[in-house]
Amino acid sequence: MTETFHWQNAPSADFAVIAEDASHSLSPRMHNAAFTALGLAFRYVAVNVARGDVGFALDFLRSRAYRGVNVTLPHKEEARAWCSEFINTDYPEVNVANTILLDSRQGFNTDTLGFLRSITPLGLKAGDQCLVLGAGGSAHACIAVLLKLGCRVSLWNRTRERANETNERFSGRVALQKEPDLAGINLLVNATSVGKIGGELPLDWTRSPSDLVAYDLYYAKNPTQFLQNAAAQGLRAMDGSSLLVYQGAEAWRCWGLPEPDVNLMVKEVQDALAI
Ligand code: NDP
């Protein structure tokens, strides 16, 4: 468990991850290790913020001379609303902030480039079939990246209305599924929060082709039910630990920091998950 602080008791530090419950976050460990490796005397902490308090918390951290924050579940929309400027030219359909430069009140979304980097080893080609589960901010990031790669993207979300809104956001370029169907899918992305908060996904794994890659954006010490089901089917499965690293490395760029040692960040995350 990561040590957390309520935002009103946030200690003197330079960077923070904010979440409703940041105790699961490996960001402090990962970023602090990368700072130390480069001889940067920065401190990165985990800060809990209740829904509705994000603007107050960001104002407070800014007044305490924090330089930047990462934002995670469920605060990315509130964080975006706090920003005076949102810099996201590559993927304009994505309108939630997971990285903030506090002094200038600039927001960024690094889940997009982080996701892109995490799937690069898969060698997806234009025309490949991808199914995204979920219609929240991280699903938008994945869909934007996959469409830009030329993949054909389908979407299933528990709440149909939200799936429709997502499709409108992407100008109808997403095929909506009433029930998720794994037939013919090359990449299946679980961008729901089921791995974190629990629940069942209505997936019939027996319909998946043998070369389907199952990617759960969530990371945890133990594989999620989604990843366990994929592995039981003999499928290649990956969790969100590489996304955590790559979106974090991209955040350094937004904060005006030098290039971090990504291999070291990967090792820190792997070590933390292995304990
Ligand atoms: P949001 O809260 O924006 O979206 C959550 C999504 O999960 C919605 O589509 C929601 O559907 C769906 N959902 C929630 N509960 C259920 C359920 N019981 N059954 C089916 N669907 C459900 O979350 P985010 O998009 O921000 O994050 C999604 C996941 O991605 C989280 O687990 C998060 O930890 C992970 N993530 C990991 C990152 C990393 O660095 N590894 C980076 C970003 C995200 P509905 O619309 O019906 O409510």
Image (cartoon, helix red, strand yellow):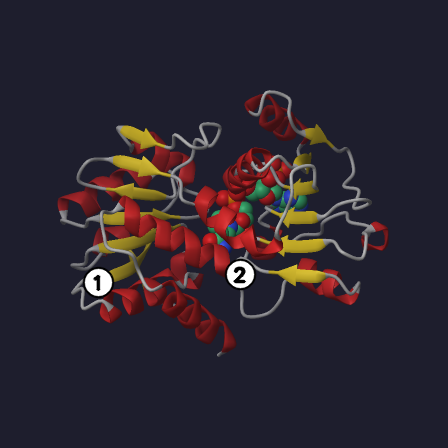
Residue type (three-letter) at the residue carrying disc 2: Tyr
Residue 3 visible to the viewer = no
Q: Find disc 1 in the rendering and name its residue.
A: 43
Taking depth in this image into account, of 55 and 17 the one nearest to the observer is 17
Which residue is found at the position 67% from the left and 35% from the top? 153
Residue type (three-letter) at the residue carrying disc 1: Arg
Neighbour tally class for label 1: few under 14, some 14-19, many 20 plus, Cα within 10 Å: some
Q: Find disc 2 in the rendering and name its residue.
A: 219
The image position of residue 208, as x and y in percent, is: 81, 51
Q: Is residue 139 above or below residue 93?
A: below
Q: Is residue 268 above or below residue 195?
A: below
Which residue is found at the position 53% from the left and 61% from the top? 219
Mark before the other along the chain sequence, 1 or 2: 1
Q: Is mark 2 within 8 Å of ligand 1?
A: yes
Taking depth in this image into account, of 140 and 21 the one nearest to the observer is 140
Q: Is residue 212 above or below residue 164?
A: below
Which residue is found at the position 65% from the left and 43% from the top? 125
Helix, strand, or loop for circle 2? Answer: loop
Q: Residue furthest right?
A: 206
Give the tally of numbered discs.
Answer: 2
Ligand 1 location (quadrant): top right
Residue 133 visible to the viewer = yes
Q: Is residue 209 left or right of residue 1?
A: right
The image position of residue 29, as x and y in percent, is: 34, 67
